[in-house]
Image (cartoon, rainbow, N blue to C red):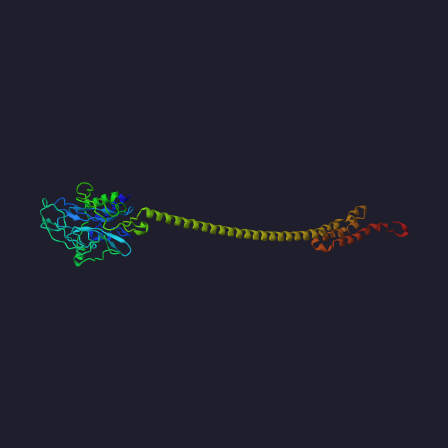
Amino acid sequence: MRKIRLLFLAFLILAIPAISLAQFGVSIMIAPPALPVYEQPMCPSAGYLWTPGYWSYGGDEGYFWVPGTWVEPPTVGFLWTPGYWGWGGNAFAWNEGYWGQSVGFYGGVNYGFGYGGVGYGGGYWNNGAFFYNRSVSNVNVTNITNVYEKTVVNETTVNHVSYNGGEGGITARPTAAEETASHEQHTPPTALQTQHVHAASTNHALLASVNQGRPAIAATAKPGEFSGSGVVAAKEAGAPYKAPENKAAASKATENKAPGNNAAENKAAEDKAAESKAAENKATENKAAENKAAEDKAAESKATETKAAATRTNENKAAENKAAATRSTEKKAAQPAAHAQPAAHAQPAAHAQPAAHAQPAAHAQPAAHAQPAAHAQPVAHAQPAPRPQAAARPAARPESAPEKKGPGGKE
């Protein structure tokens, strides 16, 4: 995964214009180790320029050393401006190196071999040929004749500090000439330089956590050649190596986010995960308790509402039943009196009329037809119906009329 990330980083570096390279890189909270002390390997051939070694950040494994090496420039007349780490106020950011007509600002870091913190004293271009200063450059005068000697005075304190700004960092600021150089057209590192960085990133021995700031491959004669006579080992670390106490807290992501992944970080991550898990469990328990309390309250409210509704229903039903019973009782009490009225139909005296042949007297039965008064039962609650029966009694009197005798005792 780290290889893929670094290849992608290399591709982006090549694709981005050099003018914006100073704003691209990774940023972390811990400073890089001090620069190791080592000798410069011999220049392999005329035309090669020295590019000093530096600490790069590999993400999962932390800082690793990129060996210094001799490189052919992309164009005749170009000079190399090394990259540097700078404190930006809340993190360290890497400012990528570049090729250009002049050497720009590289943080005031004393990389040695002509890069004393300002400019480059290891040589210069003249009519398409590079002339080497033998006082700071290791060249074979038999093979390379364009040489000279000039003492380079280091105006910076040799303390092997590898970064600018921040606690313990170099306090240098760009000069007017370096400011001008920063606005010139720049060219990013060559493909061989990019491959060189990639090879370093995959070499476990170059990790600062492994070599304690003293890499076994401090410099090479050519890019990517990490074995053979051209390899130079570091003599000593630039300062006692101090492992980061909490790489997880020290790392801060930018475009090329590269969090640390050492034992301290893993422990911090585990602790944080445990705390998060505990917090989540507590939150879950609290939520469950709240949900249960809400459910219990809802159930109680529902039970209360159901009981109240049942009570109201029972009361309403009881009231309805009572009202119905009352109406039924009243109706039942009223019905017997109404049914007693059929006595008005019991007029057998009227049916006894066939015994009398005096039919004219039977015509007096209209009094018996006065029975419709018995049908007017709605008014019969006072039971007036028996009165027509009294009227029927006189109807029997004509039957005794034949008993009357005429004069002389004859009929």
- Examine the rendering and report whether any part of residue 250 can be seen: yes
The residue positioned farthest toward the bottom in the image shown: 176
The residue positioned farthest toward the right in the image shown: 408
Q: Is residue 369 left or right of residue 321?
A: right
Nearest to the observer: residue 42 or residue 25? 42
Q: Is residue 145 left or right of residue 17?
A: left
Residue 279 percent location from the top left of the image = 41, 50
Residue 72 percent location from the top left of the image = 15, 46
> For the point 53% across and 52% down, which residue is it?
300
Quarter of the N terminus within the rendering: top left
Residue 231 percent location from the top left of the image = 19, 43
> For the point 82% across and 50% down, which residue is it?
399
Nearest to the observer: residue 179 or residue 107? 107
Nearest to the observer: residue 93 or residue 141? 141
Nearest to the observer: residue 141 or residue 388? 141
Q: Is residue 278 left or right of residue 341?
A: left
